[in-house]
Image (spheres, grey):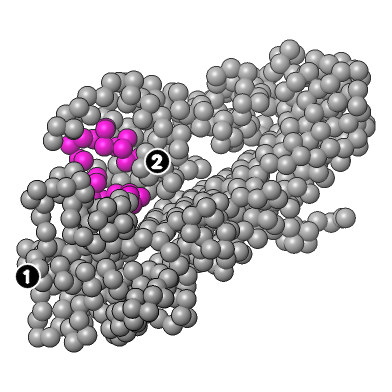
Amino acid sequence: MEAAMGLMRRIPPKHIETGLSALLSLLPHHSSELLSQVDQPLQVLSDMDCGKEFILCEYNRDADSYRSPWSNKYHPPLEDGSLPSLQLRKLEIEANDIFAIYRDQYYEGGISSVYMWEDDNEGFVACFLIKKDGSKTGQGRRGYLQEGAWEAIHVIEVGPEEEGTTNYRLTSTVMLSLTTNNESSGTFSLSGSIRREMNMRVPLAEGHLCNMGRMIEEMEGKMRNSLDQVYFGKTREMVCTLRPPSEVVQMRMPES
Amino acid sequence: MAEEEEEAELSEKQKVEIAKWFLLNSPPGEIQYVAKDVKSILNDDGVYDEASSEAFPLYNKSHMICLQMPDRSGDVLVTSFNELDVNAFLDPRSAQVAIVDHVKQDCIEVRPAKDEELPSPYIEEFRCALDAEVMRYVDEAYPKGVCSVLCVNGKDVDGPGSDFELVVVISAARLSPQNFCNGSWRSVWNVGFKDDQQRVEVKGKIQVGAHYFEEGNVQLDAKHECEDSTLFQSPEDCALSISSIIRHHETEYLASLEASYLNLPDTTFKDLRRKLPVTRTLFPWHNTMQFSLTRDISKELGIEK
């Protein structure tokens, strides 16, 4: 298992799906562990009832069907698929509506889904998903990207209320890939995935949605920043170490 | 689960293919780490040995790895252009042949090259002059670059009147796993000497890769191709103009890579996720009621977008 995760850390992020299915076939007895530890690109289904798309993950799956957050129905239909309690479903509906607006303001497009379910210790778990195709043939408004995808998975474990405060434990994964392609500079492709955790105990006065939303917003901002500055910055630094920019070279050149 | 039962029975051949896939997709300089993990997952030395004996030579050649020759006669590049045999690679600069162990990524021994393995004196004049110029450029431009000039076509041409082709390979790798970062720059320049047109055609392919893996896995994969040409002149003049073509295109490419990086935060990245919402203020989580209100109103007025 350790070796398998080692491999997934080295395989090009754009080949994650192939890598995972290869590992699953080599290590069938570790399949549930692999599926829970390796984040895969998000798949989408269309909810026939309301004509909206929703995101598939382990958290809205029952047998081979997936529950839509819009109609609360399983696709393909499932007789006795598990559903959240009425009260939690109410929060889920609200979360989906608000998160769709949040998503639109930051992503200018994309698809989002929120799923909630009760857990064993009086709290609940919420999963916020976003998928955005930023390519010029997709929803990239500025048209810079030949290929571009941002996928975010935020899972929040919400503890029970204690003296007016609640503990939130957030685990976020962002998977990103982008390719630009033009005549003068060829293809330039960056891809990556990072995972971060955050713990917070906050008053419940403003409600779960407000607390979870702020946490996700802060986390997404931080992750976007580290991908941009740290991770892409490091690969840029590497390029400059391999072949330093010409100004540096010219200074060392005795002639010309 | 039923599906697992089916998948559990992989043939040896399928296992070898999967193992090869992982090995060949190793980032620059990381195949040994990948090999260790693949070996422990397979738990079958026979399968592993078969996969590694097939994958390592391919990886070594496509990454153009550089190996030190044992007698301090310098470095030899492992490429498909100087491959005499599966594990024998010509180093024309020292006129030696390096015998390599692909899986250990080590040069075991060297032997002098036979006459028939080396180009004719006529070709060697061009090759040697170009090698000297390219070496000068690589020393200046790459802190850790290695280069070689090889004849890939017409090595036995013994005088004017026939076409021949040289290839310039440049390989620079920087491995610093302690800083969670590895990278490589590889360029291949095919140089075709066209005798009848008295021109030299230059075609370049540059590939740059980098992997940063501290608490994540981020990889750069950049490729570029270009073409240029110059006059067929004396070996020395050819060497000068070809190396300056290479220098020019590689410098330009590096600048365009820099530009791609500079464009990231403000333009490219924005199409994926903005830094701030379209409203330019943080999302009003404390006041989400306003959305249900405005949505209801816009629905009523029919101005929903």
Residue in the foreground of this view, choosing between A20 and A136: A136
Please identify the quarter of the rendering in which residue B304 is found.
bottom left
Name the kind of residue labelled 2 in the image: Tyr
Q: Position of residue A105 (x, y in %)?
A: 42, 73
Q: Is residue B96 magenta?
A: no
Residue, disc 1:
A122
Q: Residues within 10 Å of mark 1 (few under 14, many from 20)?
A: few
Look at label 1 and name its amino acid.
Answer: Glu
What's the magenta region?
A: A19-43
From the image, give the main secondary structure of the stretch colored magenta: helix
**How far across and how far down the image is residue B274, in percent?**
47, 70
Q: Position of residue B134 (x, y in %)?
A: 77, 40
The residue closer to the viewer here, B70 or A177, is: A177
Tag 1, which secondary structure?
Answer: loop
Circle 2 SS class? helix
Chain letter of mark 2 equals: B
Residue B176 visible from this viewpoint:
no
Q: Which mark is residue B33?
A: 2
| A41 is within the stretch colored magenta | yes
